[in-house]
Image (cartoon, grey):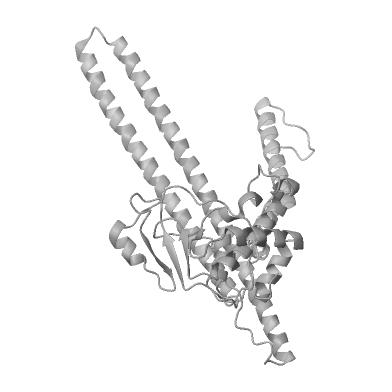
Amino acid sequence: MDEEIPREVKLFINQHLTGDEIYQILEQLRRTCIPNNQVLWTGMPPMGPLMDTNNALCPKKQKSPKQWSTYVHGASAIFAWLISEAESVTVLSRPPPVRFHPSEGTSFQTIEQPIIKGTTGNKGVNAIRIVHPRVPDAADFTYQLWPKDGVAAWVSTFGIVTCTDRWRDIGSPQIIGVCDKSRVFSHNQEASSKSSKMNRGGAQSALSNNEKGIEEHELRERHAQERCQMEAKATEAKNALRRKQSKDRQDLCEQHKRRRQELKKNDKKRTEAREKEVREQKQLARKHRKEKSKLRVCERADIVSLAKRQNRELEALRKGKRVDRKTLEERQRARVLPLKRENMQERAGRWDDALQSPLPNTQASTHPPESEIECLSFMSRLERRFWSFIESLVYLTRS
């Protein structure tokens, strides 16, 4: 590899690719990349046969899915470094307000964007332009994304567009040289002028920042998965409610149909039956509206509680506190278990008192009751005490 490649990028590429793969990708990209005409989107067309699974040069067949993902990440870093020598680069994305993946963990956000901006010590482009081809009549409208975001011009022309399709799930982000709170490469190093002690301190700081960035990415990814799971549960609950309400309407219609057949000859009763049907339909509609509103309230409460919890976790992580779910569960268990134990001790004390106290309607000589009613009463009380004792044992073993 050339000496012009920054150290962080070179280290990342060497961790993801072999020497032969690096040479092969560089040769392919140098033949196909045209300066100022490169577009960043899903896939890398300049890779040519190296990304074509039908071509013998493509190494995907010889690699596992994880190895192939590693290969693509390394190729993305080389591609970004080559096009960063140009004056500008074009990016395709969704329309505002959410233009990029909310998790901020895609290859463009964590690998390609920092390199083309020049935050790795390389030259970098002068401007990044962006296009939103999903919007009709907007495929030819470009505006500047960096260094100055000109999204206001696009919004004034096309307005705010909401995309209904969900974002794709992404794996663990590949972060290189995280600096501060942003996912960019460490840059502007002054190795020749600094002493060895300062170099060691800078390396430790970069390592801690890198670990913090990885933790924040993992937390954001987990939050995105929780939101997706909540959306799936809400959709399932809505579908279940729709099926139930549809069944209720069908049952009511069948009931009305049978009632009409019975009252065909009597006009007065038929009129009364129709009025009753209208009232029942209105009652059922009101019941369905209440169920829907109750479901919406529960869903909003779940969303608000989830957002608050996720914000608390992010704030705790940014303040340097680690979010440990096991510790939170242990704390909650420590608050709940004493209450359960006290409850169980009270139950056990009542059971001991019940065993020591004599049963009513029984003789001191422990003879069984003579009448059949007294015998049944004695057996029922004994059975209730036995099951209360079993319940106490079950709660004690669970706690």
51 vs 236, left or right, is right
| Above-or-below relation of 203 to 215 | below
Residue under the image location 69 percent in, 68 percent down: 12
Pinpoint residue 365: horizontal percent, then vertical percent: 80, 38
| Above-or-below relation of 121 to 142 | below
Pinpoint residue 266: horizontal percent, then vertical percent: 22, 9
Residue 357 visible (yes or no): no
Instruction: Identify the image quadrant of the N terminus.
Output: bottom right
The number of numbered badges drawn on the structure is 0
Pinpoint residue 178: horizontal percent, then vertical percent: 61, 73
39 vs 291, left or right, is right
Q: Nearer the viewer, residue 99 or 377?
A: 99
Pinpoint residue 65: horizontal percent, then vertical percent: 70, 49
Q: Nearer the viewer, residue 381 or 345?
A: 345
- Farthest residue, direction top: 265
- Farthest residue, direction right: 365
Image quadrant of residue 105?
bottom right
Instruction: Identify the image quadrant of the C terminus.
Output: bottom right
Image quadrant of residue 198?
bottom right
Residue under the image location 40 percent in, 32 percent down: 245
Q: Nearer the viewer, residue 385 or 295?
A: 295
Residue under the image location 64 percent in, 87 percent down: 190
Residue 241 visible (yes or no): yes
